[in-house]
Image (spheres, rainbow, N blue to C red):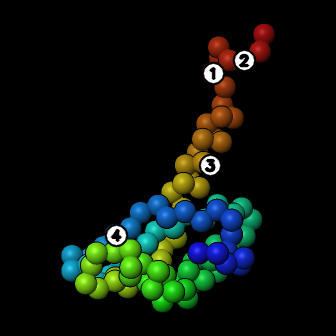
Amino acid sequence: MNDPRLPLLVSITRVSVSADLRHATVYVSIMDTGTDKRPAVDMLQAAEGFLRRELKPRLALRYVPSLAFSLDESIEHGTRMIQIMDTFQTPSEQPE
């Protein structure tokens, strides 16, 4: 999707589909520090109809699932944890 209002780094981290394949929850990660991420998720939700039309010819399903977007902060949380761990030095890594 090419929308200049969306942050540059929006990644789909996983998709959960209902048993009847009629509903899908799309988990997205947004790597944009310092801004509220909820408007980007709302923009994706507003574009659901467009995205479903784009998916229709690509899916071999009778029905294209309805899409619900949810913010996934696991990648951002993992990045934060790595940064915190990098601040600790082991005794062998300390300068002499």
Q: Please name the residue that numbered disc 2 is placed on.
A: 94
Mark 1, secondary structure of its residue: loop
Cα gap from disc 1 to disc 4, whole angstroms: 41 Å
Q: Where does the image place residue 56, in percent across and percent down from the top left? A: 38, 82
Residue under the image location 68 percent in, 65 percent down: 8
Image side of residue 44 versus residue 31, left or right: left
Q: How far apart are marks 1 and 3 (CA)?
A: 19 Å
- The residue most toward the top is 96
Residue type at the position of mark 2? Gln
Find numbered disc 2 in the image and state the secondary structure of the residue it sits on: loop
Q: Which of marks 3 and 2 is nearer the N terminus?
A: 3
Q: What residue type is labelled 4?
A: Ser
From the viewer's perspective, tell me whether residue 13 is left or right of residue 35: left
For marks 4 and 3 on the same chain, the one whose residue lies earlier in the sequence: 4
Check if mark 1's residue and mark 2's residue have beta carbons within 8 Å: yes
| Label 3 to label 2: alpha-carbon separation | 22 Å
What residue is shown with label 1?
90
Question: Residue type at mark 3?
Answer: Arg
Per the model, the C-alpha gap separating discs 1 and 2 is 7 Å
* Viewer-nearest residue: 53 or 78: 53
**In the depicted view, which residue is nearer to us: 94 or 19?**
19
Identify the residue at horizontal 25%, vertical 84% (top origin): 62
Q: How crowded is mark 1: few (under 14 residues within 10 Å), some or many (20 or more)?
A: few
| Residue at numbered disc 4 | 16
Eye-nearest disc, 4 or 3 = 4
